Amino acid sequence: MTENPDLPPKPPYRKGSLRSFVRWFLIGVALLWSLAVLILVAARWIDPPTTAVHMERRLQAWIHHTPYHERYEFIPLSEISTDFQHAVIAAEDARFYQHHGFDWHAMQIAAEDDMEGGRIRGGSTLTQQLVKNLFFGTGRSILRKGAEFTLVPVAELVLGKRRILELYLNVVEWGPGVYGAESASRYYYRTPARSVDRQQAAQLAAILPLPLKRRPDHMSHYSGLILERMRQMGW
């Protein structure tokens, strides 16, 4: 078949352009990953002034022209009651002190429940949730999950369990514009986090999966399950 002389010639395929794009894309990804690692290293000593979730909520309020008041106060772990700490661990990551960032057993259970068509159980650890809060917001994608999986071991290595728990309890979302244990305690119970009792702690932990929809005073069933798990764990 001969080419039509009236048609313009096809431009040559530029293989070098594709290679250049891929190279610069990979360089950009590497730079962003390195920046995230530096932020995690700094977070060992510096309390984060904001997170991706905080910024996401501000942007959503601006786009939808809705009122937004942020409550965020970072406090040391020693100022959060042990009942509060234990309730969150029991509710969100019972094997927190046994795993190294990933709870493969919990992930397997979540996958089996999903395959069986049952209710999906979350398999994310506190470390995974912390990384997601700091860098990725509430969105879900395969790329985001892949990036998260590369940063979780770094967080475990440079932060350690105590600092991971301290960061998580301080940055996690507990309601509309409510971030951290201190803000949640004062917002819902008008008391500091160090004074939260066992029942209040379980109720607050129960709203973490759906902080924008749940309220502690409606969580009697779930808080009861958390209290029972705390007892089973010796707390």
Image (cartoon, helix red, strand yellow):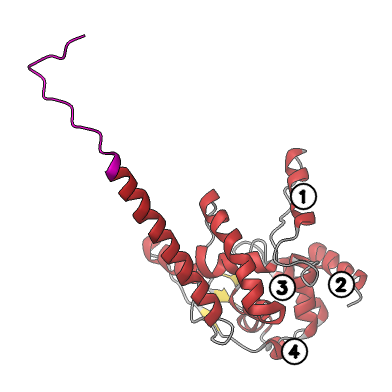
The type of residue carrying mark 3 is Leu
User: What is the CA distance from the residue labelled 3 to the residue labelled 2?
Assistant: 14 Å
In the rendered view, tell whether residue 144 sits above or below residue 80: above
The residue wearing badge 1 is 108
The type of residue carrying mark 4 is Ser
The residue wearing badge 4 is 195
Please indicate whether residue 10 sits to the left or right of residue 212 in the image: left
Q: Is mark 2 in CB contact (under 8 Å) with mark 1?
A: no
Q: Position of residue 57 (x, y in %)?
A: 47, 67
N-term mark: 2 or 1: 1
The type of residue carrying mark 1 is Gln
Q: Is residue 82 magenta?
A: no
**Residue 14, visible in the rendered structure:** yes
Q: Nearer the viewer, mark 2 or mark 4?
A: 2
**What span is colored magenta in the figure?**
1-16
Q: Is residue 6 magenta?
A: yes
